[in-house]
Amino acid sequence: MSATGGWGQGEDEEVWQLARLLKTRAWLVGGRDDAAIEAVYRHRGVLREVLAAVGCALVVEPDLVRVYNPAPPLSVRLPEGDSAQGVWFWLTVGVLESLPVRVRLGQVAAAVRAAAVEIELPVTQSRTELSAFAGGLRRLCFRGVLEELEGRVEALVDGEEDPPVLLKVHHTRLLHVLPRGVQVDGWGQWAVDPAEDPAEWLAGLARPADAGVRVCAMLADQAVVHACDLDEDELRWLSDKGPTEGAALARSFGLELEHRLEGAAWVMPQETYDGQVAGRFRFPGRSRSQAGTVSHAALLLIDSFVSEGVRGGMGAPGPNWCGMPRSRVVGRLGELAKRHAWWNKDLRGDLPRLAEDVRGMLEPEADLLRVTGGFEEWWWLSPAAARWTVLSEPAPVPVPAQCGDVAKGVER
């Protein structure tokens, strides 16, 4: 679906198209998304109700639509490590308020580097650092906070002190960059510095008080919601009201509810599949032509877990999770590598590295894998992963309607 038009003919269809778009793109800006902004304005009342049911707040202005997504539940496994792009992004946000409306890229870069020195962040101007800096600027351009009047922000990567790039700063949109629901102290400052303690900062974010809203927010944001991650109130709501209220809300996004003992998911029906990524993760294609080495290995491992894994053993997150010791996973990858000569040569020669790359795809991104420690590390695969299988090359590849293709929020 295009953000510039192509809405459904019926009012209900237009609403779910807009609701799905707003859960996918938290920012619509004037001059680029005018048709979508106009459509959102017409349906702003019902869209606010639909989004509020999944914990979101909708702001509609003449040249801006902003969706504030709820904080992720504490059970969600977030990627570890610092993001260099994130550091430079927030440094840039901090200095833009004091800069004029029209400003050269070199002025922005100088102000941001001065701010980095103040917080004792090393400024190396290496290519990696410049790429991270430019990436943060690009994110601000996408949000409409910055506008490129002349040139492109990627010119920063070339290392020039003052590249010929002229920017426009939309100061009124800066306030919409900051997340909502952050705990503040008596001085109105954030009570916890996210740079010093990101886990505590995330834990302190406000979350929906209603169990049903929390569950629906997870259904809208995650490929699958596992019952083992829910508290008592959330489990009760999913069991008692999920089949009715959860299914009705799913239809408001043009989706369908799949509800089983192990959990639930909002699934995109094939007839409404629009071919675009509907969230931060999309499971890889199911044939060799659609998958690289890591994604193809992940798909083949799913088949191995389902056919060979131990079901619901000690340490499993749930009764139907399939498990294998890590040594068996590495061994199985070795067997697969011998059969698939087209796999990346370096990965075929370094099976432990390949195993970790597969884990990186299945665990933090898709949340289909849980790893437990102990005498021997065990990998446990979610029952939801069984819906993905590898197709033989000659077989036609239908457009999948799968748990990973759901409307999910990508901005906080």
Image (tube, grey):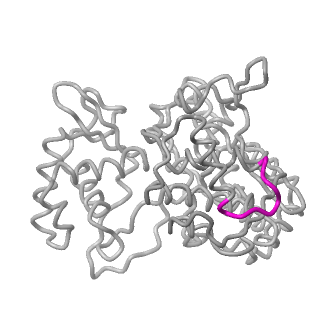
Identity of the residue furthest to the top in this view:
186
Question: In the rendered image, which quarter is residue 38 located in?
Answer: bottom right
Considering only vertical position in the picture, is 251 above or below 381? below
x and y percent of residue 258 in the render?
53, 50
Q: At x 79% / y 47%, what residue is drawn?
A: 98
Where is residue 207? Give x, y as percent.
67, 31
Percent coordinates x, y for residue 266 in the rendering: 57, 52
Of the pair 91 and 208, the residue shown nearer to us: 91
Q: Quadrant of the N terminus?
A: bottom right
In the image, 277 versus 253, the foreground residue is: 277
Q: Which quadrant of the figure has residue 6?
A: bottom right
Near-viewer residue (354 or 106):
106
For the image, the number of numbered tags is: 0
Residue displayed at 59% across by 55% down: 136
Part of the protein shown in magenta = 97-106
Q: Nearer the viewer, residue 197 or 7?
A: 197
Residue 157, image x and y in percent? 51, 65
Q: In this image, 122 relative to 212: left or right?
A: left
Q: Quadrant of the C terminus?
A: top right
Q: Is residue 104 magenta?
A: yes
Left or right, residue 360 beside residue 121: left
Q: Give residue 217's quadrant in the image.
A: top right
Note whether 40 is above or below 200 in the view shown. below
Residue 280, placed above or below residue 156: above
**Any magenta on residue 381?**
no
- Name the side, left or right, on which 377 lies relative to 94: left
At horizontal 29% and vertical 52% (from top left) the residue drawn is 357
Q: Is residue 253 visible?
A: no
Question: Can residue 91 be seen in this snapshot?
Answer: yes
